[in-house]
């Protein structure tokens, strides 16, 4: 999986709610996917950034190939939005990200 967006590091005691809409396709449009997901991450005082609960699919993923994917990942104390093009196709990914912090 390849990161297409990375948040700033979460401060201790902070949380962030992320909603992402990710879509992509190859040059001739034969490989494509669209995802809409939501997740909440937090960082406890003295702790590391972690997922609160689970990642929710806000719509049924639309994929031309089962090898395509979109997910979240913790990297250090930041959160990444990651995509997978199946290892065979060059997919041009676009992401719309709403991050609400508290």
Image: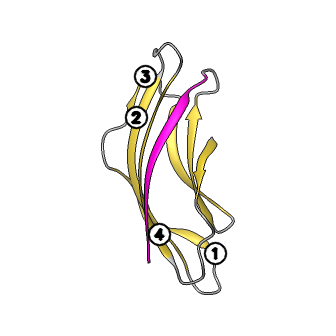
Q: Residue at x 62, y 64 (%)?
A: 78
Q: Given contact means CB atoms under 8 Å apart, are the residues at marks 1 and 4 in contact? A: no
Drawn side of residue 3 relative to residue 51, left or right: right
Residue 65 in the image: x percent, y percent? 47, 23
Q: Main secondary structure of the magenta part?
A: strand
Circle nearer the N terminus (3, 2): 2
Mark seen at residue 16: 4
In front of the other: 85 or 10: 10
Instruction: Return the residue found at the far bottom.
Output: 45
- 2 vs 1, front mark: 2
Which element carries disc 2, helix, strand or loop?
strand
Q: Quadrant of residue 50?
A: bottom right
Q: How is the image coloured?
A: secondary structure
Q: Is residue 92 left or right of residue 2?
A: left
Residue 19 spot, x, y in % from top left: 40, 55
Q: Are marks 1 and 3 in contact (CB under 8 Å)?
A: no
* Of pointers 4 and 2, the one earlier in the residue sequence: 4
In the depicted view, which residue is nearer to us: 19 or 45?
19
Instruction: Residue under label 3, please give it.
Output: 64
Task: Decide whether residue 1 is among the magenta residues.
Answer: no
- Mark 4–mark 2 Cα distance, whole angstroms, equals 23 Å
């Amino acid at each position: 999986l390849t990161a297409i967006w990375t948040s700033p590091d979460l401060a201790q005691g902070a949380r962030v709610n992320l909603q992402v809409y990710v879509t992509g396709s190859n040059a001739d449009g034969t490989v494509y996917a669209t995802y809409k997901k939501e997740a909440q991450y937090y960082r406890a005082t003295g702790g590391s950034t972690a997922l609160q609960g689970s990642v929710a699919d806000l719509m049924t993923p639309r994929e031309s190939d089962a090898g395509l994917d979109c997910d979240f990942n913790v990297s250090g104390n930041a959160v990444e939005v990651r995509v997978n093009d199946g290892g065979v196709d060059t997919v041009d990914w676009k992401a719309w990200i709403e991050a609400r912090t508290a």
